[in-house]
Image (spheres, helix red, strand yellow):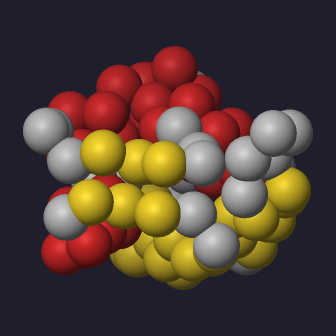
């Protein structure tokens, strides 16, 4: 499952979700945005692992923000990623 979007005033973001049994197996976040430090992407991509595909956008955003910690997203937000996640799993 996949969704992508050019964020208004921001960057292109793509979210790919692999799932089984109604739960998220993995999440892949790509695009032309920036993340500092770059290795924080692994924390973001694992933030929703094991969650049900029915997780709300608000709960997904909260989990992503918690995983982001002190890292900084530039050109995209956790809210954008959560919205694309929900669109991908539709």
Q: Position of residue 7 (x, y in %)?
A: 80, 46
Can residue 47 be seen? yes
Can residue 15 be seen? no
User: From the viewer's perspective, is residue 35 above or below residue 78?
Assistant: below
Which residue is pictured at 15% across the width and 39% down the height? 69
Q: Quadrant of the N terminus?
A: bottom right
Q: Position of residue 75 (x, y in %)?
A: 60, 48
User: From the viewer's perspective, is residue 17 above or below residue 87?
Assistant: below
Q: Position of residue 85 (x, y in %)?
A: 63, 52
Which residue is pictured at 57% across the width and 63% down the height? 33
Name the foreground residue: 51 vs 81: 81
Which residue is pictured at 30% across the width and 45% down the height? 72
Residue 26 picture quarter: bottom left
Q: Position of residue 57 (x, y in %)?
A: 59, 29
Residue 86 picture quarter: top right
User: From the viewer's perspective, is residue 88 above or below residue 51?
Assistant: below
Name the foreground residue: 19 vs 71: 71
Which residue is pictured at 53% across the width and 38% down the height? 77
């Amino acid at each position: 499952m996949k969704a992508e979007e050019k964020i208004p005033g921001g960057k292109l973001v793509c979210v790919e979700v692999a799932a089984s049994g109604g739960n998220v197996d993995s999440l892949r976040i790509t695009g032309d945005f920036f993340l500092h430090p770059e290795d924080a992407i692994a924390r973001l991509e694992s933030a929703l692992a094991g969650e049900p595909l029915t997780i709300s956008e608000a709960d997904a955003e909260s989990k992503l923000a918690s995983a982001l910690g002190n890292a900084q997203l530039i050109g995209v937000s956790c809210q954008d990623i959560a919205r694309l996640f929900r669109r991908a799993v539709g």
